[in-house]
Amino acid sequence: MTNINTTDKEIAGSLAAMKRAALAARKLAIQTNTGIVMVKDNKTIIVTAEELIKAGYGK
């Protein structure tokens, strides 16, 4: 992987933005009682709203 110069504000802020987007997706999935699709250990999985709540995202 290539090293990224983190002095670029857009690059440095992109990780934080992706984390915010992931949290918003989890909260929306709970509100609409739907699942989200994720990749874990190179496998595609569906995480249900119930599983998200049990993991603590429903607060």
Image: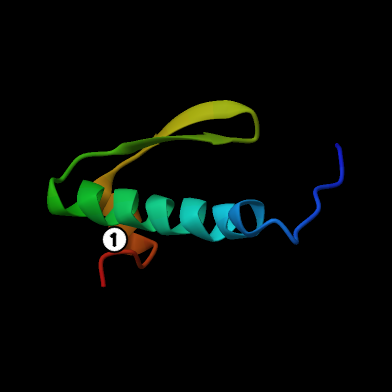
Left or right of residue 59: residue 18: right
The image position of residue 44, as x and y in percent, is 50, 26
The image position of residue 39, as x and y in percent, is 54, 33
Left or right of residue 33: residue 23: right
Q: Classify the position of the C terminus by image quarter.
A: bottom left
Image: 57 above or below 8:
below
Q: Which residue is drawn at 26% across and 57% down?
A: 27
Q: Which residue is drawn at 48% across and 56% down?
A: 17
Q: Which of 56 and 15 is in front in this view?
A: 15
Amino acid under label 1?
Ile
Count of residue discs: 1
Q: How crowded is mark 1: few (under 14 residues within 10 Å), some or many (20 or more)?
A: some
Which element carries disc 1, helix, strand or loop? helix
The image position of residue 12, as x and y in percent, is 65, 59
- Which residue position is annotated with label 1? 53
Q: Which of 13 and 25 is in front in this view?
A: 13
Q: Classify the position of the N terminus by image quarter.
A: top right
Colouring method of the image: rainbow
Q: Which residue is outermost to the bottom?
A: 59
Which quadrant holds residue 53? bottom left
